[in-house]
C-alpha cells in the first residue's frame, strides 16, 4: 500500500473516539521485549507490514528493528521512515529539539534545523498531541511527557508537569485564541492533554471559525 494507507490511518486518528484514546494500554509498552505485529511507512510512502521491536526493558532503541514477512531484519531510524506502528501504538518521525531559555524549557519542531525523533501519536488534528518517551536514568523506568503541536507550527507546548497535571498558566498563553478552552483548563473541567486536544479540535481554531460563519 502507498500514500492511500497513510491518509486512511490519519483519517482514522481524527475520528477515533476520545474514550478509546484514553484507554490505550500504555503499560503494555513498558514490558515489551520481543517483536510485535506492526508496520513501517517509508519516506517513499510505501507501507510494509511485519513485526516491530523498538525497546527492551530499560532501554529505547534509537533505530527500531523491523522483520518483514520474509524474515529479513531491517533497522530504521527517524530519518529513514515517516512512521511506524507497533501493536496499538503509532510513532511518527518528527523534527524535534528541546532547549532552555532563562531556565524555561522550550520545545522546537523546525524542518532541517532540528533532529528527527520518534514521537508517540496520541491524537491528530488541527491540534495534535504527542508523547515523548524517555527512560529514568536512576531507575530504568519508562516514562513520557505530552506535547501539543498546532498544524504547521514550529514549536511544541509542554502539556503537563509531572504529577502536577496540566501546565495551566503556560497553556492559558498558548491557547489565547480560544478563551473558552482557557476557562475550562483553569477551572479544571479539562484535566488531561487528550481532553484538551479533543476540545480544541471540536470547538476552537477552524471549528470555531466554521461555527461563527454558520451562525452569521
Image: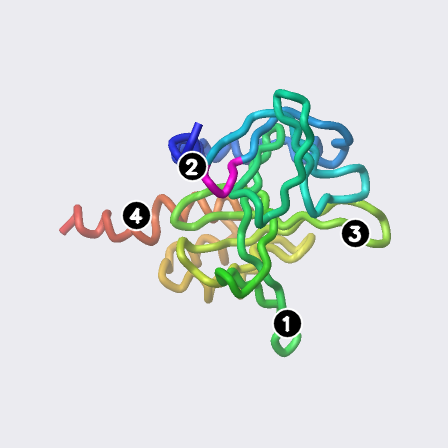
Describe the element under mark 1 as helix, strand or loop.
strand
* Labelled pair 4, 3 in contact (Cβ < 8 Å): no
Question: Per the image, is 44 magenta?
Answer: yes
Q: CA distance from mark 4 to mark 3?
A: 39 Å
**Which of these two is toward me, 77 or 119?**
77
* Labelled pair 2, 4 in contact (Cβ < 8 Å): no
Foreground mark, 1 or 4? 1
Query: Which residue is the site of mark 4?
Result: 207
Query: Which residue is the site of mark 1?
Result: 100
Foreground mark, 3 or 2? 2
Q: In the rendered image of this protein, does residue 112 appear above or below residue 199? A: below
Q: Which quadrant of the figure contains the N terminus?
A: top left
Q: How many marks?
A: 4
Foreground mark, 2 or 4? 2
Q: CA distance from mark 1 to mark 2?
A: 32 Å
Describe the element under mark 4 as helix, strand or loop.
helix
* Residue 70 location (% of width, % of height): 64, 21
Q: Earlier in the sequence, mark 2 or mark 4?
A: 2
**Which of these two is toward me, 78 or 183?**
78
Q: Residue at x 45, y 31 (%)?
A: 17
Query: Which residue is the site of mark 3?
Result: 136
Give the image quarter of residue 61.
top right
* Residue 25 location (% of width, % of height): 64, 31
- The magenta span reads 41-45
Query: Which residue is the site of mark 2?
Result: 10
Describe the element under mark 3 as helix, strand or loop.
loop
Mark 1 is surrounded, within 10 Å at the Cα level, by few (under 14), some (14 to 19) or many (20 or more) other residues, namely few
Q: Earlier in the sequence, mark 1 or mark 4?
A: 1
Amino acid at each position: 500500500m502507498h500514500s492511500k494507507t497513510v491518509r486512511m490511518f490519519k483519517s482514522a486518528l481524527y475520528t477515533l473516539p476520545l474514550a478509546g484514546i484514553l484507554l490505550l494500554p500504555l503499560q503494555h509498552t513498558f514490558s515489551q521485549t520481543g517483536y510485535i505485529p506492526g508496520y513501517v511507512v517509508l519516506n517513499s510512502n510505501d507501507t510494509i507490514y511485519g513485526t516491530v521491536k523498538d525497546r527492551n526493558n530499560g532501554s529505547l532503541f534509537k533505530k527500531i528493528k523491523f522483520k518483514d514477512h520474509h524474515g529479513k531484519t531491517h533497522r530504521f531510524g527517524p530519518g529513514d521512515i515517516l512512521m511506524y506502528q507497533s501493536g496499538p501504538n503509532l510513532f511518527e518521525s518528527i523534527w524535534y529539539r528541546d532547549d532552555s531559555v532563562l531556565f524555561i524549557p522550550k520545545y522546537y519542531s523546525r524542518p532541517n534545523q532540528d533532529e528527527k525523533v520518534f514521537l508517540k501519536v496520541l491524537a491528530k488534528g488541527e491540534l495534535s498531541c504527542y508523547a515523548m518517551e524517555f527512560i529514568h536514568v536512576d531507575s530504568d523506568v519508562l516514562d513520557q511527557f505530552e506535547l501539543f503541536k498546532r498544524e504547521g507550527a514550529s514549536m511544541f507546548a509542554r502539556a503537563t508537569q509531572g504529577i502536577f497535571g496540566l501546565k495551566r498558566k503556560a497553556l492559558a498563553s498558548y491557547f489565547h485564541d480560544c478563551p473558552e478552552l482557557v476557562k475550562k483548563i483553569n477551572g479544571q473541567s479539562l484535566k488531561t492533554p487528550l481532553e484538551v486536544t479533543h476540545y480544541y479540535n471540536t470547538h476552537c481554531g477552524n471549528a470555531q471559525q466554521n461555527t461563527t460563519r454558520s451562525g452569521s
